[in-house]
Image (cartoon, rainbow, N blue to C red):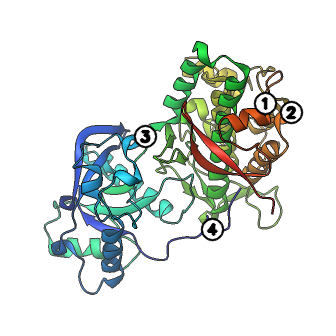
Amino acid sequence: MISDGASAERDYPLALLNNNEIGVIEKILGSGGFCEVSAVCWIKLNPQHDPPLVSTPLKNTRERFGKMFHGYTEIYHSHGNIGHSADIKDGQSLASSSQKPPPRVALKKVKTTLMKDRHQIGTRDLLLEASVLRKCSHPNIISIYAVGYDDKVEDEEEKEEYFDSSMFPQRINFIMIDQLNCTLRKKISEWKANKGVKWMKSKKTLGYLWFERMMVIKQIADAIEYLHSKGFVHRDVTPDNIGFADDNFVKLFDFGLVKNIRRNNDTITDHGSLGDCNDQVFDLTSNTGTLRYMSPEVALGMPYGLKTDIYSFAVVIYEILKMSKFCRRIIEPSMFTRMVIKGDFRPTLDNSIPPRMQDLLRRMWSSDISVRPSSKQVAESMEELFSEGDEHLLPTGQNVSIDTFESFDLEPPSRCNIKQVICPMRVFHKVESNRQ
């Protein structure tokens, strides 16, 4: 669910940095078609790169950025902890004990090896991602802290474009974002491996591992609901674009394909109420995203809207709960299109998934968008599951009793909010009662 404080947008431009003010490690954390991500190991602002006096807002953001990341180098670089964020504890940092340590960050940069036309596409996508993330502030959506350029721009008139008085420059080639520890894809592999370990085969432990996965689904639902409330459709919700940060909160990322449908006037139909864009569809680019997670309307070149993310999310939920790839035996794209996209084939859901989750999944991955729930309805359904206890939350035959939660220093999931707690076995989430 969207919290009151989660919807606040930044009322100032992003900090503008020069590539010489940031150092990254050589190891690439992640790589896509146009960009690659590296861990930031040092940050040192140089007054020489401050924007002209006419760009006071941009200069102020650099000062704000400098204060926020004060001591970053000493905390994350001098101890040789680059890339090992789980080893850093607040009390071990060199920063003042009264100051919150800066977030661990990474640099997402357009690949320099790309041909000119592809480099332009990558730059455009990066600018789009920056424009979207600047408007988002939610614990389950990756945060952006700065945008930047390199020293290849020599011409002074061209350089002025970087110091435009708008929220951020029109041409950038890197952004600074949260550094993530792993993707959901990797986490699913870990869950699958841990399920087979002998000491984890007790009903109590297996039930708790199930609860962990359900909490991840809930956080993704909250992120998508928030994104849709802003009028954005992600268009590439997959386990590869969902990760886990230092605080073990789920983070939705990779916003290069995001579309703001509230700015699109090409409405085809509207089955929703006035002011409700959940069932609106638009003439948007087809075949956008990853085929296995792509909704039928996107794959077939039909008009689509927000509910394309709901279909993709359903596939992700299935993979989280079953710890297996959606329709994994259908490998050939042509066969997948014929059977799943056109033929409406879906995996059989059994008792390993709670009945109410089965019903939710069937509605979410329906080819009929009018059957699919909105992101708000999905988030509300997850909230209800956690508030109603074990009967609807867990598969048939599994149970997480009050004693189980107490043994992990947890409270039962009744009318709860997520709060992190570290368990000796794994990272779980503490639930805190809202009752007064």
- Identify whether 231 is placed above or below 80: below
Mark 1 or mark 3: whose residue is earlier in sequence: 3
Cα separation, mark 4 vs mark 3, equals 26 Å
Q: Amino acid at mark 1?
A: Leu
Location of mark 3 (residue): 181
| Residue at left offset 80%, top offset 20% | 350
| Label 1 secondary element | loop
Instruction: Answer left or right for 331 relative to 214.
Output: left
Instruction: Answer left or right for 434 relative to 195.
Output: right
Location of mark 1 (residue): 394
Q: Which one is in front, 91 or 58?
A: 91
Q: Which one is in front, 262 or 4?
A: 4
- Identify whether 304 is placed above or below 265: above
| Residue at left offset 82%, top offset 42% | 371
Q: Which one is in front, 284 or 222?
A: 222
- Residue 272 - label: none
- Residue 391 - label: 2
Rendering coords of residue 392 (x, y %): 84, 35
Instruction: Work out whether residue 224 can be spotted.
Output: no
Q: Amino acid at mark 4?
A: Gly
Mark 3 touches mark 2? (CB < 8 Å): no
Cα separation, mark 1 vs mark 4, equals 31 Å
**Residue 421, image quadrant:** top right
**Residue 144, image quadrant:** bottom left
Mark 2 touches mark 1? (CB < 8 Å): yes
Q: Amino acid at mark 2?
A: Glu
User: Label 4: few (<14), some or many (≥20) within 10 Å?
Assistant: few
Location of mark 4 (residue): 5
Cα separation, mark 2 vs mark 1, equals 6 Å
Rendering coords of residue 184 (x, y %): 53, 35
